[in-house]
Amino acid sequence: MVGMQTIIYWVVLLALSFPLGKYIARVLDGRVNWLRPVETLIYKLGGVRENESQSWKAYATGIILFNAVGFVVVYFLQRFQASLPLNPSGMSQVSPDSSFNTAISFVTNTNWQGYGGESTMSYLTQMLGLTVQNFLSAATGIAVLAALIRGLRAREVSSIGNSWVDLIRTTLYVLLPLSLVLGVTLASQGVPQTFDSYAATNLVQATKDGDGKPVTTQTIALGPVASQVAIKQLGTNGGGYYNVNSAHPYENPTPLSNFLQMVAILLIPAALCITFGEMVKDRRQGIALLVAMTTLLLLFMIPSIAAEQNGNPKFVSGGLTTNANWEGKESRFGIENSAIWATATTAASNGSVNSMHDSYTPLGGMMPMILMQLGEVVFGGVGSGLYGMLVFAIIAVFVAGLMVGRTPEYLGKKIEPYEMKMASLVILIPCGLPLICTAIPLIFGTGQSSMSNPSAHGFSQLLYNYSSMSNNNGSAFGGFSANVPFHNYLGGIAMWLSRFALIVPVLAIAGSLGKKKVVPVGAGTLPTHTPLFIGLLCGVVLIVGALTFIPALALGPIVEHLQMTAPAGGVH
Amino acid sequence: MREFIVAIRVFIVLTILTGVLYPLAVTGIAQAAFKDKANGSLITQDGKWVGSHFIGQAFDDLKYFWSRPSATSPVSYNAASSSGSNLSATNSALMEAIEVRVKALRDADPGQKEAVPTELVTASGSGLDPHISPAAADYQALRVARIRGKSVEEIKQLILKHSTGPDLGVLGESVVNVLELNLDLDKK
């Protein structure tokens, strides 16, 4: 079932996360300085007062202003791309609703794509709009996490760092060097990196289009792909250069490029657990969270691989060699690599794909859907996954505190009503948004009219896509016609809320915890690095997710699975 | 207000760094170190481009190996607009499409009685998959050998020549590049 590739993947991923995590901790604590002259120049040009420390409100203001500027720039780049330079293939301007949706999507680290990249975006928009946001939305996530960690370890201070310094240092010392190395490596595997226009080549055998007209040439979409793909994976963005993302043989040409991209998807989210342990000076705390995330992901990855290998029972009876579900999967990757990717990319809020999730078996496709619905805390987005998981840890110690009747504490900080109110917001918004946003289009009929597959799977498409946008993931059941004004606007609002309506309470927790004094560990303190706590944490994440989503899942993938496996003449 | 101006200034500086200098740096290194790959691994024959090593083409002529089905529109293997079928496992259109493809393969080679390799009749994710499995190539070897008047052994040698993977002995699947195999067949 689970083969060598899964094992190698996990070994390499976890081995790399330790040194990288320690390095990021040093970056966030200001102890890495090998690009000091560049860093100083950026502070000067940006007007940043490097040594100024901010309250949580000032920090949040900085983050939101910065992202608002990003939204405006990406929106107008798309609206005016037809008259801007670097558009050799003559892309026209993008519609207002699609530009709105895409701008929010890339600013919020969602990278949901209602459009097809190679048939919509100019090279300029891809570089100056989308690639830039791939970096900056990732830096935003890590900055907010850094602020929360500082709140947890601080002793009675009201400052949680400087948002500009965190954004700039993360970009300069972490994201740029890693992307440069990965981008060049991907180009060596065959990912294009050029500013030439699309290539027109002669077909070996002429063919005919839908109207019967002969076609003798093939237009091959090129561009600066490698640079964008590198950061799309490292920053848990996931927005593809091409429509089919990393299933495209240019975006992901070889099994080796596939392996490197799969590692890149989870690398920084895994490393940040180690960073956390380093920064709070208790490595066990970080390792405990990494173990919890790994356990939760394996719980869904293994069944997804098995479901795709068992495949579609109609195949063999239809005269084919195997039931393995090859529909929507690429020959060079195979079934196992496709399902590893599908679950890794949805556990992380990455959302890039190397196979078409819409064509997965009902259960194979349900696993990625649940991983998003758990609130993107199983690895999750860079920074955002871990700050989400830390909030779940606060909930877990609170639950444990209730059981024994003690004031809960986490890392020596008392968890009191204010923190619990903020934590509840962070937990409840990702529970409510997907369900509400699935229900609204059903009421107006726009949900039904966009479904491309019949019956239960049509509902799964709607549920999957709003689970994706409402958790900043970005992957899709791609047959669904999402690029219409209704879904573009509703989805845009969902993506904005699920990002910034969580960032503000997280920073509020950081500010409030920072002011508290540290209480010494006593006999009644619940240790938060033990297997017991890891189990408790996983349990809380699973129970919140299950209670919220099982009814909806029963209407989609679960009933579809029963339809698929029912004997002929049975259930219809 | 000061914070707003800082936001704009930092945004501009980081945009130049990540949106201009970074892509240019990757382009510079890639074009210097592996120009051919950075430009799309295009295949030249008699001074003309005849495709890319990584982008599949549609074949239905009996003398060629056929690629996997492609769901791109308006033509299959449209490399300017990649797409999968996005048909669900329970959509009756999926099995109907597979039945048509199985029939086409059987009609093309009535002597071939074995089960049809699944991936040869299911649409790829990109609609541009340049590969088929060695089993899917072997399945078609009888037909190609018959039409071209070659021995099956000779054809299978060619298949082997154009097979690659798994990478590093373990990653991914063993695959055959259909376009390069067909170009090679035409040379002989």
Image (tube, rainbow, N blue to C red):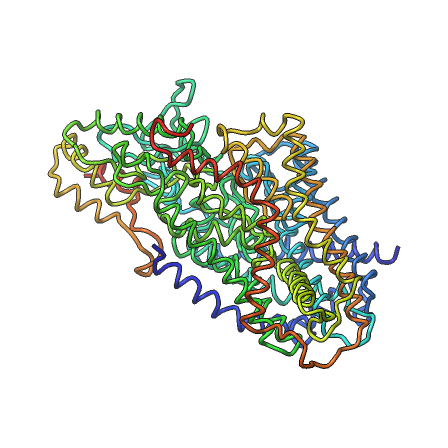
The quadrant holding residue A99 is: top right
The quadrant holding residue A270 is: bottom right
Q: Position of residue A274 (x, y in %)?
A: 58, 71
Q: Is residue B58 visible?
A: yes
The quadrant holding residue B166 is: bottom left
Looking at this view, is A181 or B114 the one in front? B114
Q: Is residue A33 visible?
A: no
Looking at this view, is A214 or A453 the one in front? A453
Q: Residue furthest front?
A: A404
Q: Position of residue A60 (x, y in %)?
A: 79, 58
Q: Is residue B171 above or below residue B52?
A: below
Please state if A49 lies on the left or on the right of A362 as rendered: right
Q: Position of residue A328 (x, y in %)?
A: 41, 39
Q: Position of residue A499 (x, y in %)?
A: 69, 50
Looking at this view, is A137 or A429 the one in front? A429
Looking at this view, is A557 or A470 the one in front? A557
Name the residue rendered at 30%, 37% in the picture. B120
Q: Is residue A174 above or below residue B24?
A: below
Name the residue rendered at 36%, 48% in the picture. A334
Task: Give the tally of numbered discs.
Answer: 0
Quadrant (top left/top right/bottom left/bottom right) for the N terminus of chain B: bottom right
